[in-house]
Image (cartoon, helix red, strand yellow):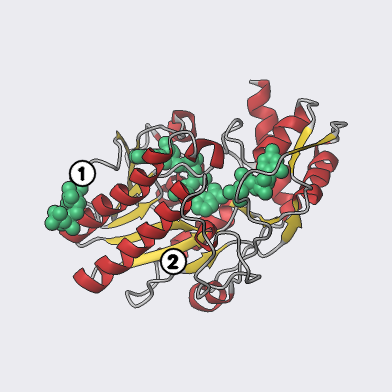
Amino acid sequence: MMPMHSTERVLVTGGAGFVGSHLCDRLIKNGVDVLCVDNFFTGNKANIAHLLGNPLFELKRHDVTFPLYVEVDKIYNLACPASPVHYQHDPVQTTKTSVHGAINMLGLAKRVKACILQASTSEVYGDPEVHPQPEDYSGRVNPIGIRSCYDEGKRCAETLFFDYWRQHNLRIKVIRIFNTYGPRMHPNDGRVVSNFIVQALQGKDITLYGDGQQTRSFCYVDDLVDGMVAMMGTNEHVTGPINVGNPGEVTMRELAELTLKLTGSRSRLTFLPLPQDDPRRRQPDITSAREILGWKPKIDLEDGLKETVAYFKHILEA
Ligand code: NAD
Ligand code: UDP
Ligand code: UDP
C-alpha cells in the first residue's frame, strides 16, 4: 500500500517573506511538501507566486499569534517582521508575533511531535561589548527601548524554545541569524542594503545614519538557507543556539561606497541622526556553525550585492 505521506511535510511560517520565500524554494527543490503560512504583514505574494501551481506547495493566510492545527513533520518558524521600520510600526504586535507565535508553534510541534527551528537573531546580543559575538555571550539589550519589542520578543522566544525542550523533550533548533540580504528584500522596508541600492539606482542621496562608522556583517540569503537546512538536518542532540552569518564586517560608509561602485551611481552621501540603541558593531563568531554544521558562507559581499542590485533594477523598472 502507498504510504499516506510519501514526502516529508514541512511548515514554514513567514514563508512569503524575504528569507522564507527562498527557504520554500529550496525545500521544494529538495522534493519536500511545503506548507507556507503567512499573514502578509511584510511578506508579499509576488515572492511565492511562482510556487503556487506546484503540487508540493500550499499557501495558507494565517497569523501565528492564533493557534494553528495542521499535521507536519518539521517547522521552520520565521514569522516576524525583521526590519526596524516594520517591527517598530506596531511594536505590541511584534512582541505578540514572537512570543505568542512561538508558544503556538511550540504547542503545535509538541502535539504532532515535529522538530522545530527558530529563526532567532543577532539582536539577542543587543549593542554588544564582546566582539565578535560567540553564542555564550548573553548580550546587552535595553528592555525598554524602541528595538526592545523585537530584541526581547526574540529573546523570550528562545527562552520558550529551551523550556519546551527541557520540560517537554521537544526537538528544537535555534539559529541566530546575522544581517542577511539578497533578492526579494522589500524595497521600502528600511533596511540598509535595500535602502542604499534603491537610493543609488534612483539617484537619490544615500542616507547614512550617525557617522556611518557602525559595522554590520552581511550574509547572502542563499548561504543562510544552506545554514538553515543544515541545522534542521542535525541529530536531535543539537539544539543550538548557533550563529549563522558571514563574518565579513564592514562599516555602513564602506557599504555605501561599495553600493555606489556597483551601481555606477553618482548619488551623494547624506548623514542623518543615528536611531536609538543602534548597535555599534556586529560580527558573528561562526566557530560552532563550522564545527557542528560543517557550514560556512560561500558568497562574498560584492558578488551578493551584484545579484541584489540586478533584482532591484528589475523591480524598479517593472
Ligand atoms: P520579512 O519581514 O521579509 O519576513 C517575515 C515574514 O513573516 C513576512 O512574510 C510577514 O508577512 C510574516 N509575518 C509577520 N508577522 C506574522 C504573523 N503574526 N503571522 C504570520 N506571518 C507573519 O523578514 P525576513 O528578513 O525574511 O526575516 C525572516 C525571519 O528571519 C524573521 O523571523 C527575522 O526575525 C529573522 N531574521 C532575519 C534577519 C535578516 O537579516 N533578514 C536577521 C535576523 C533574523
Ligand atoms: N497549539 C496550536 N496548535 C496545536 C497545538 C497547540 O496552535 O496543534 C497552541 C495552543 O493554542 C496552545 C499553545 O499552542 O495555546 C501551546 O500549546 P501547549 O500544548 O504547549 O499548551 P496548552 O495547550 O496546555 O496551553
Ligand atoms: N542604516 C543607515 N542608513 C539606512 C538604513 C540603515 O545608515 O538608510 C544603518 C543603521 O543605522 C544600522 C545599519 O545601517 O546601523 C543596519 O541597519 P538595518 O536596519 O539594515 O539593520 P539592523 O540595525 O537591524 O542591523
* N-terminal label among 2 and 1: 1
Q: Which mark is residue 101?
A: none
At 48% across and 33% down in the image, what residue appears? 89
Q: Furthest residue to the top?
A: 318
Q: Mark 1 points at which residue?
A: 67
Is disc 1's CB within 8 Å of ligand 2?
yes
> Disc 1 on helix, strand or loop?
loop
Please tell me in which quarter of the rendered image ligand 1 is found: top left
Q: Name the residue under label 2.
A: 231
Residue 291 sits in which quadrant? bottom right
Residue 282 image point, x, y percent = 65, 61
Whether 81 is drawn above or below 116: the answer is: above
Residue 126 or residue 52, whichever sits in front: 126
> Disc 2 on helix, strand or loop?
helix
Q: Is label 2 in contact with label 1 (beta carbons under 8 Å)?
A: no
Residue 318 sits in which quadrant? top right
Residue 181 visible within the image: no
At 81% across and 41% down in the image, what residue appears? 262
Residue 126 image point, x, y percent = 55, 59
Whether 231 is drawn above or below 7: the answer is: below
Residue 293 image point, x, y percent = 49, 72
Residue 242 or residue 74, whichever sits in front: 242
At 60% across and 30% down in the image, what residue appears? 188
The 10 Å Cα crowd at callout 1, few under 14, some 14 to 19, many 20 or more, is some
Residue 275 or residue 307, whichever sits in front: 275
Three-letter residue code for mark 1: Pro
Left or right of 253? Residue 218 is left
At 68% across and 57% down in the image, what residue appears? 280
Three-letter residue code for mark 2: Met
For the N terminus, the quadrant is bottom left
